[in-house]
Image (tube, grey):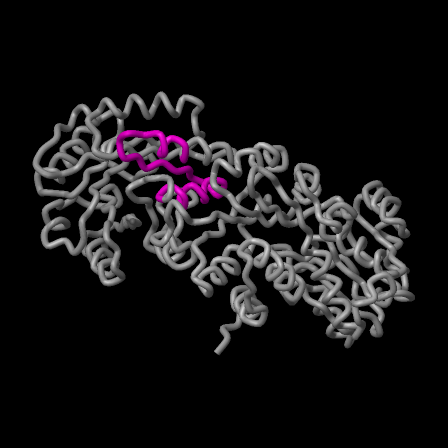
Amino acid sequence: MICVSIGRGRHRMLMQEHAELAKQDVQLVELRLDYIRRSVDVSRLLEDRPTPVIATCRRPTDGGKWRGSERDRVMLLRAAIVNGADYVDLEHDIANQIQRYGSTKRIVSYHNFRETPDSIAKIHEDLTKLDPDIIKITTMANSPDDNYKVLQLIRSSKIPTIAFCMGDIGTPSRILCGQAGAPFTYATFSDERKLAPGQLSYLTMQSLYRYESLNKDSKIFGVVADPVGHSLSPMVHNSAFEDISFNGVYLPFRVPREKFKTFIQQASELGIAGLSITIPHKEQAAEIATHRDQDVAGIKAANTLIFKDGKIAAYNTDCLAAMECIAKSLKIDLNDESQSFKGKRMLVMGSGGVARAIAYGLVRRGAEVTVSGRNINRSEQMAQELKCKSVDWIAKQGIKADVIINGTPVGMHPEVNESPLEKSHIKGNCVIFDTVYNPEQTLLIKYARELECKVITGTEMFVRQATMQFKLFTGEKTSRSTMIERVRRAISPVRYG
């Protein structure tokens, strides 16, 4: 179940939103009494309420907006109980001041907006002594480990426990807490009205992540990146799961570089079955895997991990997806692998995982490849390992190429006014391939179109590699045309008709 939190400055507005949520079949609503700017009339809010409610009144130290005295706040919570609120939320330090009365259930809560303490298990134990019907623990996630801690807390608790982390690192715990055994999770009325850091809207929780349909048998997938907020992978894969009625969910995991190995070690305990890997983890993913396919072994970077029977299999769908995009543009058959691009001059900008995957695929198929990265030492090492040429970042502008590929994040949202190559250095008879997909029409692609070059957008590559990942995740095929339409709808400022 999803509890939707609403907080407005006036009683009438709060009641209107409550009624609107009832029309959307929301089963539980949290009334944030601390948001009301005048004297709170609890009886007015609770009388003829359209759904069960949780009455909550937070102090600023707990992320709330209460302006009155602590005595008045306690009195208000007592009044909510007397007026028959279905639940009342009591912070751990006042729970003993408010006695149980009537049928109102007690949520005893702990909030920490700074961290997830190492003593979280002890905190939970202390809360069990305060006569709770439900324990609620909400902490700030500073590491992916924090999600693991709170989800384990739910699983081991004998008292119904809601536990999740705030912030973008904590997003997965908000979605997975129900699967772990929490009686409900929290969402907000809309994306524009977040009442806590990292809170998701009811529509996002219900439609994108299909929270209500998740169960103990649901398979967990996700994208691992830092940052991860820009990724469209959750939208793409969750929609495709729904298309085939697949019992799974795909989540955004923000994992800092130094936490990647620990996160992977905990993945199986979290129930993760597969992951998409992107910046900056592709090289580490290849290293940590227990099995590598031929492309991963050659590229030394992976963008897909599959967890099964205690083993981690690594794949690289970037490589084949890029080769198919280039071959289609040049009208070349990929069947004769070693000779597919023989005689074709290719410039690959970048030295990260995606650039390495593309350069490897091109060299393997007979192309004359030159790589150029902003980190000259890294690009020179990559060129040496892949047996191709390397030039420094400035010198790339003088390279004559049939295909120019941007394998860097330059031009990615929000830095949309940047290009890895100036317009004056683009020749009109070449193919421009930008692996950035958000936005699809990057500044580099715009330059290329103005010069009447053939273009390959990052959206084309992203969707090709995503359909390959989907097959690895589920064993099923998905519609590439449907997927590309969804991506373009998501990133386009123009509404498709």
Q: Which residues are magenta?
A: 151-178
Please state the horizontal and vertical placement of residue 485, each as a whole percent of the image: 55, 71
- Residue 111: where, in percent of width, then height? 35, 32
Let me know if residue 82 is in the magenta part: no
Q: How many marks?
A: 0
Q: Is residue 107 left or right of residue 471?
A: left
One can see residue 191 in this view: no
User: Residue 358 falls in which quadrant of the image?
Assistant: bottom right
> Does residue 25 appear left or right of residue 353 in this picture?
left
Q: Is residue 148 above or below residue 456?
A: above
The residue positioned farthest toward the bottom in the image shown: 497
Q: Nearer the viewer, residue 13 or 380?
A: 380
Measured along the vertical axis of the image, is residue 89 above or below residue 334? above
Query: Image height check: is 243 above or below 187?
Result: below
**Residue 411 seen:** yes
| Residue drawn at (13%, 38%) of the image | 104
Q: Residue at x 43, y 29 (%)?
A: 116
Instruction: Say left or right for 64 vs 362.
Output: left
